[in-house]
Amino acid sequence: DTGVSQNPRHKITKRGQNVTFRCDPISEHNRLYWYRQTLGQGPEFLTYFQNEAQLEKSRLLSDRFSAERPKGSFSTLEIQRTEQGDSAMYLCASSSQRSDRGNGYTFGSGTRLTVV
Amino acid sequence: GDSVTQMEGPVTLSEEAFLTINCTYTATGYPSLFWYVQYPGEGLQLLLKATKADDKGSNKGFEATYRKETTSFHLEKGSVQVSDSAVYFCALSVKAGTALIFGKGTTLSVSS
């Protein structure tokens, strides 16, 4: 078990460009979550997958954001036409159906996005 | 809606001092409660948890008790170390599969 892996660790992009992040969850975990964390704030929920199905999306997830989890394994989060306000740490977490409430989730180290 | 409120930081302590970080919550039903820690440049790590009223979570000398009557889950440690310097987040989960709801975090700085 190598934990939750996120790539890249850092991304600097120009405003208006598209970016894509990847998350590889713990292999036996069927649930996967994306969060966004800005400076001085706690993580805010973006979206959630159970297996390959996207079951919930936050109002924070504008139409410029899209997430996928093909085959219920890794997930990608794409941001189109990036804006400076998108600069944040994007965190991925995974859990198994039996462990959610009891054990919380396992988080990756995050991808830090800077839009210049 | 469901929410978590943490005391604002930063909290600055000397090594071996007693630590309390207050956390209160608002939630429907009976949430599970968590404390996560985030060290500089790293992701969040689960520190401790409690799933029902009066449960006490503990780990690495940290403790927190689920108090339903006061809707609180305060984090305590009897003697902090420099290595405890980090950001601490209180969080809740209302139902299995739903997202964790986090407080804003409290920065702890411990000096020797």
Image (tube, coloured by chain):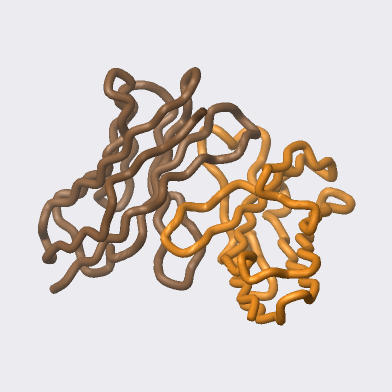
Chain colours: A orange, B brown
Q: Quadrant of residue A80?
A: bottom right
- Is B66 placed left or right of A56 in the picture? left
Q: Does any portion of residue A75 appear in the rendered image?
A: no
Q: Is residue B2 above or below residue A111?
A: above
Q: Quadrant of residue A36?
A: bottom right
Q: Nearer the viewer, residue A73 or A17?
A: A17
Q: Is residue A26 above or below residue B66?
A: below
**Which residue occupies 30% across, 52% down?**
B60
- Is B48 placed left or right of B29 in the picture? left
Q: Is residue A55 above or below residue B18?
A: above
- Is A114 placed left or right of B48 in the picture? right
Q: Does any portion of residue B67 appear in the rendered image?
A: yes
**Which residue occupies 51% across, 40% down?**
B101
Q: Nearer the viewer, residue B2 or A100?
A: B2
Please state the total of marks drawn on the protein image. Answer: 0
Q: Quadrant of residue A41?
A: bottom left
Residue B76 in the image: x percent, y percent? Answer: 22, 45
Q: Quadrant of the N terminus of chain A?
A: bottom right
**Which residue occupies 15% across, 62% down?**
B13
Residue B39 in the image: x percent, y percent? Answer: 40, 66
**Which residue occupies 47% across, 20% down?**
B30
Residue B52 in the image: x percent, y percent? Answer: 41, 23
Q: Quadrant of the C terminus of chain A?
A: bottom right
Residue B48 in the image: x percent, y percent? Answer: 39, 44
